[in-house]
């Protein structure tokens, strides 16, 4: 017990929540986070290494005898961090680069979905300016959905009814990437399903719902996510069964056959039609942010054991249990987010950084924060999120909103309607 030295790679809210859960594990003796943030600084040893400096991460792990790495963001996975750690005999939670292409390339993800028969939107590849007008005509019944085929840090997708905006985005993408995807618009409600997977099996975590637009009422620009709640009632028992039989199981069968099977979390971004049929909007090869912050607290089973088992293809021998509770998180963003967030301002009022894991509690998940002379400074677009857990979704919303009201950041903004679609309340 308690013998493991674990490194969490990344420095956002997702990584703070991973550290909070891992620090509660009796299996973890020493916890490191690279580069971490002001929140991880108080529960782990922050290491000043960039997540995408793969060789530096591997060297640190070898020098410090790290025996398990949990990779938060996708970029290091696409740059072969898992491959390099496996070569160095270090357990890694996160897939090898070949499989991380499910997120790294939208076209690759579409090809895999077509091969294994997973439902998703139809699409067309454009690689020449002459094709644009005809393609826009072909897809003109609904808003146009345009997707770049590169990792674009959440800025690679445009959904618009404005033809000239679509045309400009397509032209720029063809010029910079050589090609772009024009995708059929899928109407419906979105949900996120995080599936822990290895060569032996998979475990679906409770589904959640993110709020991607910056402002109340789903207005404003797309962001990385302004808040989320879990579980999401849109994923009924019948929808859940369809997600498993039509999407998760075929993907597992495909990914477990690989030379090195998928070992990590497969984020299935879903669009659920009015008739309850799920379609895949996107795959990510990591925990969602902020979905992670409200999904992990609902897991009763020790998180280290789950992640370590998955890195060893031993997931199928585990019985993963969940709390019968609800969690909700509200993101506090810097002024100017998502376009040009103003950094460097002091965040005041954070009092309960440590999650009191148990029902009816609230806590702060740090994201873009850093400690400067004992002050917490906003160091990113999404600065922190206030999270809560309760027996009911409305209880979690009340606790999380009570907490965020105690925190001040000049110009900071947050949505007042997280979970509102379900709760029918607008604060
Ligand atoms: P993605 O990065 O592929 O998840 O796309 C970002 C957001 O764009 C999604 O969360 C959806 O809100 C929206 N979106 C993406 N693809 C579609 C689609 N085919 N139909 C409708 N909305 C979409
Ligand atoms: N919250 C959306 C994502 O992590 O991609």
Image: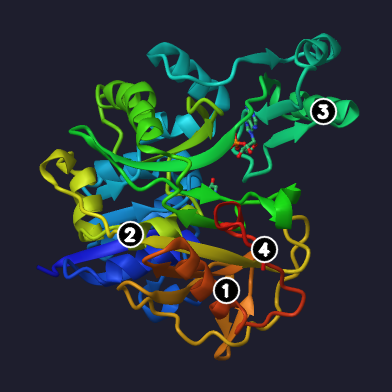
Q: Are marks 1 and 2 in contact (CB under 8 Å)?
A: no
* Coloration mode: rainbow
N-term-proximal mark, 3 vs 4: 3
Among numbered discs 1 and 4, the one appearing first in the sequence: 1
Residue 290 or residue 27, whichever sits in front: 290
| Residue found 40% across the figure and 68% down from its top | 389
Q: CA distance from mark 2 to mark 4?
A: 25 Å
Task: Say if mark 3 contacts mark 4, CB within 8 Å.
Answer: no
Task: State whether residue 408 is above or below residue 221.
Answer: below
Q: Does the beta carbon of the residue at mark 4 sit less than 8 Å from ligand 1?
A: no
Residue occupying the point 62% across, 46% down: 153
Q: Residue at x 49, y 75 (%)?
A: 399
Q: Which residue is mark 3?
A: 166
From the image, tell me which residue sits under label 1. Answer: 401
Where does label 2 land, which residue? 298
Residue tagged by mark 4? 426
What's the CA distance linking mark 1 and mark 2? 19 Å
Residue 399 against residue 283 in the figure, above or below: below
In terms of image quadrants, where is residue 189?
top right
Label 3: which secondary element: helix
**Hey, which quadrant is residue 94 in on the image?**
top left
Q: Mark yes or no: residue 79 visible.
A: no
């Amino acid at each position: 017990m308690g013998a493991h030295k674990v490194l969490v790679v990344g420095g956002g809210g997702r990584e703070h929540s991973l550290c909070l859960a891992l620090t509660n594990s009796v299996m973890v003796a020493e916890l490191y986070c690279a580069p971490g943030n002001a929140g991880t600084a108080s529960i782990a040893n922050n290491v000043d290494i960039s997540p995408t400096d793969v060789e530096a991460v591997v060297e640190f792990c070898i020098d410090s005898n790290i025996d398990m790495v949990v990779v938060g963001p996708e970029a290091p996975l696409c740059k072969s961090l898992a491959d390099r750690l496996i070569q160095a005999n270090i357990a890694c939670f996160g897939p090898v680069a070949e499989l991380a292409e499910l997120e790294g390339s939208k076209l690759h993800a579409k090809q895999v979905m077509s091969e294994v028969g997973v439902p998703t939107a139809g699409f067309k590849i454009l690689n020449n300016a002459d094709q644009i007008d005809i393609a826009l005509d072909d897809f003109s019944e609904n808003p146009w959905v345009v997707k770049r085929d590169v990792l674009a840090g959440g800025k690679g997708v445009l959904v618009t009814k404005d033809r000239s905006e679509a045309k400009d985005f397509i032209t720029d993408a063809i010029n910079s990437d050589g090609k772009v995807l024009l995708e059929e618009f899928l109407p419906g409600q979105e949900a996120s399903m995080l599936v822990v997977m290895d060569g032996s099996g998979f475990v679906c975590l409770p589904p959640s719902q993110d709020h991607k637009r910056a402002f109340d009422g789903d207005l404003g620009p797309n962001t990385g996510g302004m808040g989320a709640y879990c579980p999401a009632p849109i994923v009924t028992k019948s929808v859940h069964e369809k997600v498993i039989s039509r999407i998760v199981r075929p993907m597992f069968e495909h990914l477990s056959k690989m030379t090195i099977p998928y070992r990590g979390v497969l984020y299935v971004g879903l669009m659920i039609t009015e008739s309850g049929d799920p379609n895949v909007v996107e795959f990510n090869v990591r925990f969602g942010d902020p979905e992670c912050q409200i999904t992990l607290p609902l897991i009763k089973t020790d998180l280290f054991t789950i992640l370590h088992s998955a890195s060893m293809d031993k997931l199928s021998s585990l019985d993963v249990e969940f709390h019968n509770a609800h969690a909700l998180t509200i993101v506090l963003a810097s002024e100017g987010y998502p376009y040009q967030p103003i950094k460097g301002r002091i965040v005041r009022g954070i009092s309960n950084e440590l999650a009191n894991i148990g029902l009816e509690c609230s806590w702060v998940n740090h994201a873009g924060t850093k400690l400067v002379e004992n002050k917490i400074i906003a160091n990113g677009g999404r600065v922190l999120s206030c999270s809560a857990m309760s027996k009911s979704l409305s209880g979690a919303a009340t606790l999380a909103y009570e907490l965020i009201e105690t925190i001040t950041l000049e110009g900071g903004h947050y949505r007042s309607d997280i979970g509102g679609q379900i709760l029918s309340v607008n604060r």
